[in-house]
Image (tube, helix red, strand yellow):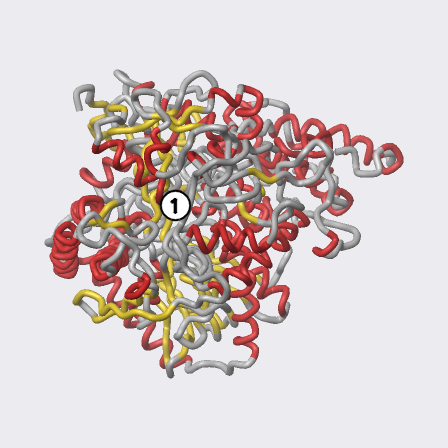
Amino acid sequence: MADTRTIEIEVLRYNPEKDTEPHFQTFKVPFTHDTSVLQGLQYIKDHLDGSLTFRWSCRMAICGSCGKMVNGRPELSCHTFLRDYYPGKVRIEPLNHFPIVRDLVIDQTDFFNNKLPSVKPYVVSKESKPLSAGTFLQTPKQFHSYYQYSQCINCLLCYAACPQYGLKPGFTGPAALALMHRYNADSRDRGWEERAEILNAEDGVWGCTLVGYCSEVCPKHVDPAHAINQNKVNSTMDYFGVRKLLMPKGGA
Amino acid sequence: MQSVQTDVVVVGGGGAGLRAAIAVAESDPRLRIALVSKVVPMRSHTVAAEGGSAGVIRTDDSLDNHFDDTVGGGDWLCDQDVVEYFVAHCTEEMTQLEHWGCPWSRKDDGHVNVRFFGGMKVQRTWFAADKTGFHMLHTLFQTSLKYPSIKRYDEFFCADLIVEDGRVQGVVAIDIASGEFHLLECKAAIICTGGAGRVFGQNTNAGIVTGDGMGIAFRHGVPLRDMEFVQWHPTALPGTGVLITEGCRGEGGILTNKDGYRYLQDYGLGPPDPWPRPKAMELGPRDRLSQAFWHEEQKGRTVSTPLGHAVWLDLRQLGAAKIHERLPMITEVAKVFAGVDPVVAPIPVRPAVHYTMGGILCNGQTATPLKGLFTAGECSSVGIHGANRLGSNSLAEIVVFGKVAGEEAARHAKVTGAGKSDAARQQAEAVEKRLLGLLGKDKGERVATIRDEMHEAMETGVGIFRKADGMQAACAKLVQLRDRYRRGLKLDDRNRAFNTEWLSAIELGFTLELAEVIAQSALHRKESRGAHTRLDEFKERDDANYLKHTLAHRTGDGPPRIEYTPVTITKSPPKTRVYGGEGKKAVMT
């Protein structure tokens, strides 16, 4: 194509079967105006080095698979474009703060197997309503109190951005705490008491030091920092034993 | 090789697989469930579904309407007994999702809202803005965490089934992180691995949609049904194929050619006004709209873009407020991937492969002819889509039939004794040896070379419109590609840990066979019906000879053997499909 240019992509490589530590490798990749960073990596894999390893799937910023550090910033590689880095190089690394499995692939099991389940991210209800009785009503106000926090795609960019998670891997972290708030804030849910122990713990909302970079890098505008800080208020009310009194739903 | 004892293995962690796993867990909490998925479940392609999911709730709608729209939309190739069951259970499943927390979009009075979709007489599509699949999938995934009997095997690649004594006794899976093989012994397995859109080059599908489950079932002698029926979605971005939801037109968006003319009126879908009008113009079915684009392109009336020809999808008349409320993801996608703000400019769109109407043969209770094997979702052919799927029926399908599959597999597992572990292990070791053999080749072609040639052959020969000579050329090319594949690929990556090149090579083996099944099934169907439309002497529907399902049987290295079986007609004898015509302007909700 007429506007094809060439950019240098510097990629972190690490093969657990061979390497003692990670190193960088540089590839020259042709690109046009609409070539994403992900497509740059795919070009390398298809044509230059089939062993380059990275996750991807939907390539339209909804599956959450393809998060990488791109020139030091957590990004979804499918909606970050090579044109924006040219004529400089673009350096691609695995997301910060996670162990590396291979090349750009991180070990994400701590989030999926521990942190996410720990916040009970599902509707906890007091009594079940039969399906034949139809749906619950939700006013626009009730709907909007949780809707924004339901947009999380679990891409983990916020964990790569969070300095606290880097220092204290036990911190429940932005996405999981935002999802906890999403369910606490849902008018169909009565689970906040069950979630309170995780929320109030040192590794819960109080683990956050208000840096706010998580919200800045969130590709879906979930604003986990806001969710966490709203819950510091709730947690304080819990401490003084007044939340149940003041806010029967738990203050979400 | 590690070996695990389970009762039910669910292969695939998308909407159908998760719904099936939950149904097994609710049927009997003592059953041990293994949920095997090559990606973490919420990465599954259900996540990318946008527009919505069907379920009758309006007082001016009825199950008969949903039935008629589905059967007519499918050009009478649907099994009507299965469609009757389906339409009767959609709303209950939508309600179930609501109880589980799905953020369905609502009206100001707090009730769930529904929108129009193509080929639909009355608004019937439940939606969560334009991220319906995303919200359904996350709701199902998060809800699945409540059930301790569901053990997840995330990023485990299903390599094969173990079949012994004529029944499924296990699944062999590769732990992607380590490259180690695992044998999951089971009494029942449910395949929910999605479609095969990646057989084609320009498609709306995620990279993982490679038809693995179809390929595995096929190799074990289960026929694939109606595979020639491939849906082209009429509105995808040129180049990338990123989906622009039918919900855009459901909310009132229009399609124009390079002259600003609403060209659909020239293809039996007009008159253009009043607009919007159900089952007319832009609210026609997907097959007709994609075919109309092809004609416009032939006439030179499409827009030329750097990424190929396109038409305009114009949302401007909806206004910024409605666009941002109802179509936030489309707004973002159009800006990021096409550089267009739909509030102020039209979006360039063109058809791209979207959905596999056919799939693994199963009955209305999701059971395949192989004992102990069940299937649900896009990989299955349960019989509701016929020759052309109606938009918003696939999200409903995954939960309605995902649940059935879970219940049926649970029932089967409870009355089935343990299998033969020694024999299963021997088979699993043979699978391991065969697949490890792919890693060691010193000579051969690259995965991308054969994959790209397959794409080219399918786009050229088995596209929106088909002719005998084009399909024959595609079939011949696929024989050659399968032969080259068998001679071996050379992989740059010889390691075991997270070797995605190796997995791509295994996937390519499946897609090549499926491509051949699609091309051969298409070549044999000497008529035009729904999404299978021919430009040679078979331009018309031929009910006398082809009101039948196609069954493709594997013959080993050769092309599949094609047979036909009857379609179940209960109450709607075949008629002419009619869209467009005079009508009143719809009241939008």
Q: Nearer the viewer, residue A209 or B64?
A: B64
Q: Position of residue A195 (x, y in %)?
A: 72, 44
Q: Position of residue B531 (x, y in %)?
A: 33, 49
Q: Nearer the viewer, residue B480 or B31?
A: B480
* Callout 1 crowding tier (Cα within 10 Å): few <14, some 14–19, many ≥20: some
Q: Amino acid at mark 1?
A: Val
Residue located farthest toward the right when viewing the structure as drawn:
A245
Count numbered badges in the picture.
1
Relative to A106, A162 lies left or right: right
Relative to B8, B290 lies left or right: left
Q: Position of residue B57 (x, y in %)?
A: 64, 47
Residue visible at 58% across and 43% down?
Answer: B126
> Which residue in the protein does label 1 denote?
A101
Screen quadrant of the C terminus of chain A: top right
Relative to B136, B238 lies left or right: left
Is residue A73 at least partly visible in the picture? yes
Residue visible at 47% across and 25% down?
Answer: B331
Screen quadrant of the N terminus of chain A: top left
